[in-house]
Amino acid sequence: GSHDSFSYWVDEKSPVGPDQATVIKRLARISLVRKIMKKWSVTQNLTFKEQLEGGIRYFDLRVSSKPGEIGQEIYFIHGLFGIKVWDGLKEMNGFLEQHPKEVIFLDFNHFYAMEDSHHHFLINRIHSAFESKLCCVECVEYVTLLRMLNVFQTQNVLIFYHHPLYQEYPFLWPGNKMPAPWANTTNVHKLLQFLETTLGERSRYGAFHVSQAILTPRVKTIARHLIRGLKNTLVHRNLPMILNWVKAQKPGVMGVNIITSDFVELVDFAATVIALNDLLLEEDESAT
């Protein structure tokens, strides 16, 4: 999976988003401030299509309306506004049209400046984009690739929606089925300890689990490294150690399930995570 999957493009010319504090909104009236914000808001270099082609199947999504804009259009957001959600959904659906046996997870986990009418608009957009591909809520343990191919057939998109309105739509999975504990640290050793601890605490049954292998800048981190940005300050230096942790994991019950990272193309992240599945095959072979 990718963290803030949509942030490969953010609009530094637009107003700062409603996910930011008032003081930031005021400062961001200065164009230089928005340029600096962009360096810290972008966590991916690849478009949705490029991420999909690289093996990413879980997408971490934050969305917002644009206050003051006429209509109910919804955009991706991370400090600054990204592309329209509709455009991203169409791009993903185009990939699935060409690769009908692939399965993707879309995790809508943060909403800003959205009334119920905005939510219904967004949910209708989701339905319009994927239609029969949407997988209705099931027991998590039933959602295997084999069963999706043989029983669900065309259903290969799982939508997780962290808002009570999920209850009104059979194709929206509740957010508690996709817990994603967040370390909120700049220290890679604390991050890895947190990942180990939360893996040990994950639910044995009934939910997926996201290991967020990401470092989060604090205000003082940004202040000290204004121009360098997230990638050059935190990611480049620590990705090799994070990748080593990934290589040491085992999938399955109480093991890793979904792992997310920033700038997924900087190391062989997707290939490393995918290769962990071979350990499950080895277990099956030894059992038989």
Image: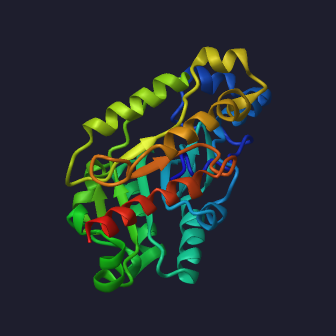
Eyeballing the image, is 198 above or below 156? above
Q: How many discs appear?
A: 0
- Give how far across and how far down residue 38 sits, in percent: 71, 36
Eyeballing the image, is 266 above or below 51? above
Observer-nearest of 284 and 108: 284
Say whether residue 207 is left or right of residue 129. Answer: left
- Give how far across and how far down residue 12 sits, in percent: 73, 40
Eyeballing the image, is 16 above or below 287? above
Residue at image point 41% right, 58% down: 279
Residue at image point 64% right, 52% down: 268
- Give how far across and how far down residue 89 sits, in percent: 53, 66
Residue at image point 28% right, 84% down: 151
| Quadrant position of the C terminus in the picture | bottom left
Eyeballing the image, is 152 above or below 19? below
Can residue 29 be seen here? The reply is yes
Observer-nearest of 70 and 270: 270
Residue at image point 61% right, 23% down: 24
Can residue 72 be seen here? The reply is no
- Give how far across and how far down residue 124 sits, in percent: 40, 68
Q: Quadrant of residue 84?
A: bottom right
Observer-nearest of 113 and 197: 197
